[in-house]
Image (tube, helix red, strand yellow):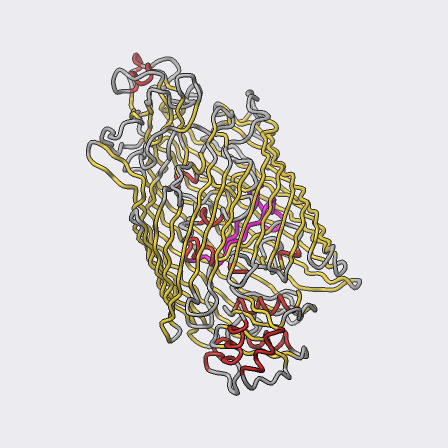
Amino acid sequence: MRSLLCSAIILGVSSQVSAQQEDVLIHQLQNAVPVQSLQRSLINVAEQAGLIVLMPAGQFQEEAVALDADMTVGQALEHLLKNTGFRFQINDGKQLIITPVDAAVQNSKNVANEADVAVIYGTALSRYEFDEASSATGFPADIDELPRTVQVLPEQLVLDQNANDLNELLVNAAGVTRAHGFGGTETQVNIRGFTSSHLFVDGNPVSNRYNIDLANVESTEVILGPASVLHGQVSPGGLVNIITKKPEVEQANSIQLELDEYGKQKLVLDSTGSLSEDLQYRLIMSGEETETFREVTTTEGTFPSERQSFSISPSISYTPDDQNTYTLRLNYAKQELPIDRGTVAVADASGNISIADIPIERRLGSEHDKRESEDSRIQLDWDHELDNGWTNRLKLGYYEKKFDDYQTRPVAGLNSVPAGSGFLNVALAGLNRNSVQSNGQLVRISDTNPNVKESDLFLSNSLSGDYQIGGIENTLYLGGNFTRRKVKDADGAALTDTPAALIPGGFGAYVYDLSVIDINSSVQPANQKLAQTLLNDSEETIDEFGLSMQNLAHLTDRLNLLTGIRYDRFEIDETSTTYYRARNSGQQGFDKLATPEVSRTQTNNDNISTQAGLMFDITDEVAVYASYSESFTPNYIGVTAGSAASSESLAPEDSSQIELGVKTSFMDDKLRFTAAAYDLTRENVLRYENLVAYLNGEEQTRGLDISSTMQFVPGLNVLASYSYMDSEIVRVSGTSTANEGNRPYSIPQHKARIWGSYEVQGGDWAGLGFGLGMEHVGERFGNDANTFKVPSYTIFDTASWYYIPLGNEQTLRLQAGIKNLTDKKHFLANGSGDAYRINVGNPRTFYMTARYEF
């Protein structure tokens, strides 16, 4: 360390600042720097400039002023070090060196003497975690000062772990577990025991069906627990807000190629820079043509599961003066993704149910099961700084998704092997909804969602800034937003018109066109893409208008109070047309309506959400907090889904959470630790039973989330989390209450994740890095009846990379890694709480990436 420090200072001290140093100093900060210790502020600025910091040990513990995001790196450093008696130097554009102003560096001996009071900070702590987020408050805030659990997952995690999609990134956060995601075609996770049905991008809502390409993700903010005060209707477990990449002042380009042993091929191009002094651009393009390990084998051959996608994301930022910034972002994506319902559960001769023991590459659907989609998103942001230092943020945008899909869906087992094909033979064999039986017979239907279109139009405006009252420093957020969500949906299925004389009791005249396969057979009968009959279609519009107010008060130097309140008004208008009515008994059959039935549902309601939290710094290293928060989701009866006993407007589903936590930071921020215990309740849960809707269900999760970042030696970074979730179905609405007291399906009690990396900081091997990770998920119930379990799993990942300098600010990063190092057979989640949609995890997979930066 001493020799590295000596070399750095000798190279860094010169009479003239080099052109390379000037390039670093004119970088604009990516984020504002909050009020904190001078040491943390210096490290924060260096991180944003991509610099390693060398500074005297034990210094800079005093409080530093906040820095605005419109400052350059040079301006920020000068501002921080003014009147401190220290100066800064930049070595080779890579190291920020802080030395006393009166230190005369004449030769290497003098430098050696200085080394006694110097400490080196290696790879930035924020390699895997940021200190700042705005999703919980509406304004940039240090998450260590908030009485909530907030975690930020940066792009560096995506690169080091080679994450394939947002779901893989999100499992790094405490309290987040995997969900089914409609056979892998949607972004869906569970947060604190509840399925997340909403996503936010740059602070605005989109459907969770939006599969954003990680190439366009700068960071991802995760709020654990209800968050309606700022965002309106959200899932009870928490909120995911994706921060996309924005234009930068400095010219930077990269090309990245990703490959793996099963046929993944993905190419990403990213370019940003200045078109003029006040105009910057960014263009990101991504294309993927990938084969996966899953495949369908029939008498006609083997058909591998394939993914194809293309996305383009241009953006422009215009800053005509110091007070205004306009950012326009566009995104277009076209995807063709396989709908893979996974594997199934099987009952043995004694009736015990477990996951089928079949090869993990075997798909039980057909080669035709795909979703073809197009996503479009446009957003305009205008940030205006007022003369008094307050900031007005205006956001206007539109998101749209269109898709068609087709799937051959497993739905039941058979009590005996059918005597032949056709609905009658299958029905006589005895349909078993609980699981596949020991005979291995699996019944499939073919259905579709044709010409689906979802759109979100959103407008929000907020005003935030600092003020003082009674000697108390405050930051206030005032905001309002309007969102209009429109959904055009339809359901179709392959039906057979069966003569009435051949129909067993309870079935309609039109029945599903069923196919039966033996899951234990390595070769299945040939699949055909069956013609679909339109069962129903609908159009719905949901308007939401909300007003929010939130205040962060620094009551004393050690006591912070966060309070917030929001009023929401939502209106729902749905028109539905039913062409074929499902029979309540069994639902295998349909009656064709002589005249299509057109129904309309109109409902509206109001909601008030609140939030309050108090944080107290016991010492400079330890803080404790307590908080209460709420969220809501509108309830309404989908006409095609069923009917309710009352046509009156339904109260929204509401959730509330009490959380107690501790946040610590030791060893100059080299060890940071957060723990939170919570009690989260979800009430007014809507449930359907035999097409009849019932309200007033209740579910609860009591748990503990622990997360930590560690950097004990230069270049070492560790991100770890553990979650305990005690989830319970407290009350079941409807006529059947058999599941009361059970555990909700697919929610583990224990979940742990750790990822660590080490990157050599100097010498001949500088830029060589290694990563090692582990993910553990406890066993989960496969349904709400708790009749079978999905087993626990522990998998390991490893990676290594090397940065090769090519000169002229050009770098090649080569990376290779192995996911699921021990080739553990595991199952990620299951959907709809039945035995027929159990996601299969990837086997051991070797991958390689090459990233050229210039």
Q: How many marks?
A: 0
Q: Position of residue 616 (x, y in %)?
A: 73, 54
Which residue shows up at 26% across the image and 30% down it? 522
- Left or right? Give the position of 226 relative to 497: right
Q: Position of residue 416 (x, y in %)?
A: 33, 16
Q: Position of residue 702 (x, y in %)?
A: 63, 37
Q: Residue furthest right?
A: 470
Name the residue nearer the viewer: 253 or 451.
253
In the rendered view, would you say 37 is above or below 842? below
Name the residue nearer the viewer: 567 or 825.
825
Q: Does residue 818 show up?
A: yes
Which residue shows up at 48% across the image and 72% down it? 94
Residue 606 in the magenta stretch? The answer is: no
Magenta segment:
216-242
- Left or right? Give the position of 169 relative to 732: left
Name the residue nearer the viewer: 437 or 382.
437
Q: Does residue 590 show up?
A: no
In the rendered view, would you say 80 is above or below 305? below
The quadrant in which the C terminus is found is bottom left
Residue 240 in the magenta stretch? The answer is: yes
Which residue shows up at 31% across the image and 29% down it? 494
Q: Residue furthest left?
A: 300
The quadrant holding residue 593 is top left
Name the residue nearer the viewer: 272 or 741.
741
In the rendered view, would you say 681 is above or below 809? above
- Left or right? Give the position of 518 relative to 694: left
Q: Position of residue 393 (x, y in %)?
A: 57, 62
